[in-house]
Each structure stands twice: as C-alpha cells, then as structure tokens.
Image (cartoon, rainbow, N blue to C red):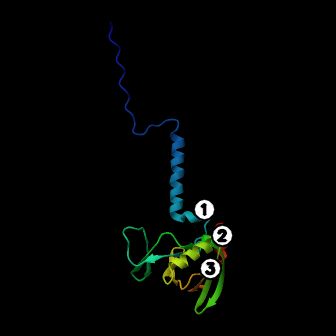
Amino acid sequence: MEPKPKKPAPKPQLWLRIGPGYRAGMRAGAFVFLLAVALGFTGCGTIWGSKGKAYFVRLHTFSRKQDEKRSRIEVEYAFEKYIYLNPRPTVDSRSVIRVEVFDVPKGKGLRLFLSKHGRFGWLQTTVTHRGKQLVIMIDGDYRGPYKISRPEENGIISLPGPYDPKEAERVKARAQKNYKF
C-alpha cells in the first residue's frame, strides 16, 4: 500500500475573514453605529416624534419608610427627604376622560373627570384609604399630597394645586391623548 499523500498545511487565517458578506455586514454595523450616535445626541423622543413631556397625572399610595418586602419607587419631596411610592398608581391619566382647570390662589387647580372604570377604582381607593394621603405625580415629578377625606362616588377628583397655569393647561390639552378606553 502506498502512503496517503499529506494534505497541504492550511494557510494562516487573518483574524477577520473577508468574504462575500463582509460589505453587507459592514454596512449594517455602520448603520447601527450611526443610529446609536444619533440617539445619543438627540434622545429617543426626538426621533420618534415625542415633543417632550406627556403631562401624565398619577396618584400613588406611599410610605415614609423603605419596605424590603415590597418594591417601592423612591421620590424626593423636599431637600433630601424621601417617600417610597407604590409602583402601581391608584389613578392615572389612562382613566381620566377630561380635565378642567380652575382658579386657586397663586395658580390653577385641576379637576379630573374619570371614566367608568376609573370611577370604580377611585371609589375603592377612597374607601380603603380614607383619612390618608396620596401623592400627586405629574410626569414622574412630585407635585404634592392629596388627602382623602371621604368616599367619593361621583368620579371627579379636584386637585387644588396650586399648579403653574401653563402646566395646568398642558395637562388639560393632553388629557384626551393620555386616556385609554
């Protein structure tokens, strides 16, 4: 038997294999890189058409102490003073059909009109948390407390504020867009 001929030694490979898909891969990589740079400079909202704040109103229950057993959102309400919000709001803009703005000393107040679903949730909240305070948040910023004095069935929440007149009008203007059926 004749010995098998030896295979030629493989050619040394470059660390980057250049083949037919190389250019397409480079184009895709360049596109992803440029998109990341654009998002870094402009922010996601600018590319997808968001014009800043959504003026989304939420009412949360809270505690003054961090609870290890429950997840809470830490919010600074005064200089280096924190409260811990329940991450699920009791009421938010998704259940507000419309908003009215009314005058209060030093600014404007908001009157929120709730949908049927929101009205039921608000009744449960006012019965469960009677005599307690909730926290008013607009776009994730602390806007003050709201004290529940009695159960309310009418589905109208009056937030006396005072709020900046421009902000109050923007909340009113965005109410229909933020409402979900």
Give the mark nearest the N terminus, 1 or 2.
Answer: 1
Query: Which of pointers 3 and 2 lies earlier in the amino acid sequence?
Result: 3
In the picture provided, is 73 more to the left or to the right than 46? left
Q: Which amino acid, by three-letter code, is at mark 3? A: Glu
Q: Can residue 56 be seen?
A: no
Mark 1 is on which residue type? Trp
Question: Quarter holding the N terminus?
Answer: top left
Give the foreground label among 1 and 2: 2
Q: Position of residue 125 (x, y in %)?
A: 54, 76
| Contact between labelled residues 2 and 3, with CB atoms less than 8 Å apart | no
SS at mark 3 in the image? loop
* Discs 3/2, front: 3
Q: Nearer the viewer, residue 166 or 122?
A: 122
Say which residue label 2 marks: 177
Residue at position x 37%, y 32% from top? 12
- How busy is the neighbourhood of tag 3: few (under 14 within 10 Å), some, or many (20 plus)? some
Mark positioned earlier in the residue sequence (3 or 1): 1
| Neighbours of disc 1 within 10 Å: few (<14), some (14-19), many (20+) | few
For the residues labelled 3 and 2, the Cα–Cα distance comes to 25 Å
Task: Please report the residue visible at 52 percent of the width from the left and 38 percent of the height from the top.
Answer: 21
Give the residue number, with chain letter if any, for mark 1.
Answer: 48
Residue at x 61% of width, y 70% of height = 94
Residue at the disc numbered 3: 153
**Marks 3/1: CA distance?**
39 Å
- Above or below residue 120? Residue 111 is below
Residue type, mark 2 in image: Lys
Nearer to me, 23 or 66? 66
The image quarter containing residue 107 is bottom right
Image depth: mark 3 or mark 1 in front: 3
